[in-house]
Image (spheres, rainbow, N blue to C red):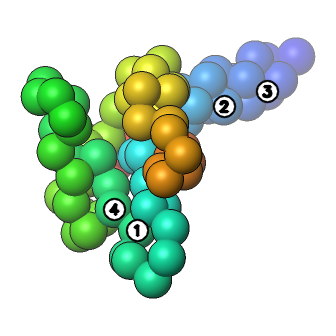
Amino acid sequence: MTSSINHNAVILESMANIKFVVRVNQGGTRAPAYVQRIDRTPFQMTTNRKLALMMGKFAAEDAAKSLQNSRCTPELLPVQDIA
């Protein structure tokens, strides 16, 4: 029974460390962009994934929702948070 509890604790801990980045495909032949900063309107974007803002699930969903329009297709990508 204790191994089951320890296993569940490990799963919950690893789930807590999962962050998300928001990738935006703008259509055409452009490279996908990632949300870099969300404290401005419009959001600051970057094509360098290493510079992408890592967010919690709810913040990433809000950012993706606000980016949806006819030309942009936002997508949440899970990233294992090492920190």
Find the residue positioned furthest to the front: 70
Q: Is residue 41 above or below residue 5?
A: below
- Sequence-wise, which precedes: disc 3 or disc 4? 3
The reply to whether dot 3 and dot 2 touch (C-beta < 8 Å) is no
Q: Earlier in the sequence, mark 2 or mark 1?
A: 2
Q: Amino acid at mark 1?
A: Pro
**Which residue is located at x 48 percent, y 51 percent?**
72
Q: How far apart are the two marked residues, 2 and 1, measured between alpha carbons? A: 31 Å
For marks 2 and 4, give the CA distance: 31 Å
Q: Position of residue 79 (x, y in %)?
A: 46, 50
CB contact under 8 Å: marks 2 and 4: no
Q: Are marks 4 and 1 in contact (CB under 8 Å)?
A: yes
Tag in front: 2 or 1: 1
Tag in front: 3 or 1: 1
Q: Which mark is residue 32?
A: 1
Q: CA distance from mark 4 to mark 1?
A: 4 Å
- What distance separates the C-alpha of mark 3 from that of mark 2? 12 Å
Q: Which residue is mark 2?
A: 11
- Cα gap from disc 3 to disc 4, whole angstroms: 43 Å
- Asked if residue 16 can be seen in this view, the reply is no
Q: Who comes first in sequence, dot 2 or dot 4?
A: 2
State yes or no: discs 3 and 1 in contact (Cβ < 8 Å).
Answer: no
Q: CA distance from mark 3 to mark 1?
A: 43 Å
Position of 23 relative to 29 (above/below): above
Residue 54 is left or right of residue 26, and the answer is left
Q: Nearer the viewer, mark 3 or mark 2?
A: 2
Q: Residues within 10 Å of mark 1 (few under 14, many from 20)?
A: some
- The residue under label 3 is 3
